[in-house]
């Protein structure tokens, strides 16, 4: 496997798309943030008792403690005002397209997963450059997910 770690978004002046995925529980959640605390702060909010991700997980009968293989991936959005401003429409457009695109190809993932996030369409999703950003995220996620699951498990020597 070529990945030794995963960078988390902590830059307070960047916006991110992030994906929680639990392969053994076959769930994935897509989100977006431009929080001053970055993806780490947004993850903390999701894990609080009223957090959206936590609520979705519990609706399925899981708890955060049972998601032993939970992986958090984050993708920085371009360092442009339209993504880092308080107005979320551009970030929501990327988030929406990532979810739609993953939904269309999720049958290619082994194991296949259920998308448990809710996303909001904005008209910016029709922009070619927004679609290109989402496509890059989806392709990277697909490759990473595939690499993680095609790596032979480490076994102890006899």
Image (cartoon, helix red, strand yellow):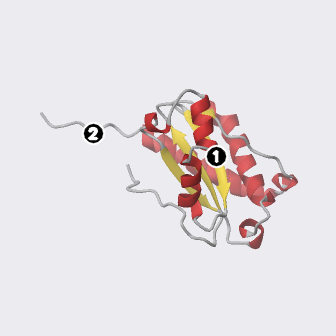
Instruction: Depth check: give the residue in front, 147 or 125.
Output: 125
Q: Nearer the viewer, residue 51 or 145?
A: 51
> Residue 24: x and y, percent?
46, 31
Tag shown at residue 30: 1
Count neighbours of disc 1 (C-alpha within 10 A) and say few if under 14, some if 14 to 19, many if 20 or more.
many
The picture quadrant where one finds residue 54 is: top right
Image coordinates for residue 98, horizontal then vertical, percent:
69, 47
Which residue lies most toward the top here? Answer: 61
* Spot occupied by residue 106 in the image (x, y as percentages of width and height): 62, 34
93 lies left or right of 60: right
Side (left or right) of 17 relative to 72: right
Mark 2 or mark 1: whose residue is earlier in sequence? 1
| Residue situated furthest right in the rendering | 123
Question: Is disc 2 in contact with disc 1, using a CB cutoff of under 8 Å?
Answer: no
Vertically, is 106 above or below 51?
A: above
As drawn, the label of residue 106 is none
What residue sits 67% from the left and 71% below the top?
79
Work out whether 95 lies above or below 80: above
As measured in the structure, the alpha-carbon distance from the residue carrying label 2 to the one carrying label 1 is 30 Å
**Residue in the image at 60% along x and 52% along y:** 18
Residue that lies at the very extreme toward the front in this rendered image? 49
Residue at coordinates 60% horizontally, 42% vertically from top-left?
Answer: 53
Above or below, comparing residue 125 to residue 12 in the picture: above
Quarter where residue 41 is shown: bottom right
**Which quadrant would the C terminus be assigned to in this image?**
top left
For mark 2, what is the residue? 154
Dot in front, 2 or 1: 1
- Which structural element holds mark 2? loop
Give coordinates of residue 8: x percent, y percent: 50, 60
In the displayed structure, would residue 110 be above or below residue 47?
Answer: above
Q: Helix or strand or loop: what does disc 1 sit on?
A: strand
């Amino acid at each position: 496997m070529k990945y030794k770690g995963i960078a988390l978004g902590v830059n307070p002046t960047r916006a991110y798309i992030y994906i929680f995925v639990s392969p053994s529980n076959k769930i994935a959640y897509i989100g977006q943030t431009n929080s001053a605390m970055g993806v780490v702060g947004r993850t903390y909010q999701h894990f609080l008792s009223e957090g959206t991700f936590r609520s979705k997980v519990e609706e399925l009968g899981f708890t955060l403690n049972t998601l032993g293989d939970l992986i958090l991936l984050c993708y920085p959005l371009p360092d442009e005002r339209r993504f880092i401003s308080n107005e979320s429409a551009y970030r929501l457009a990327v988030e929406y397209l990532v979810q739609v695109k993953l939904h269309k190809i999720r049958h290619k993932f082994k194991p296949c997963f259920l998308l448990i996030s809710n996303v909001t369409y904005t008209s910016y999703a029709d922009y070619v450059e927004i679609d290109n950003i989402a496509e890059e995220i989806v392709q990277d996620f697909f490759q990473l997910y595939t690499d993680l699951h095609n790596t032979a498990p480490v076994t102890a020597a006899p």
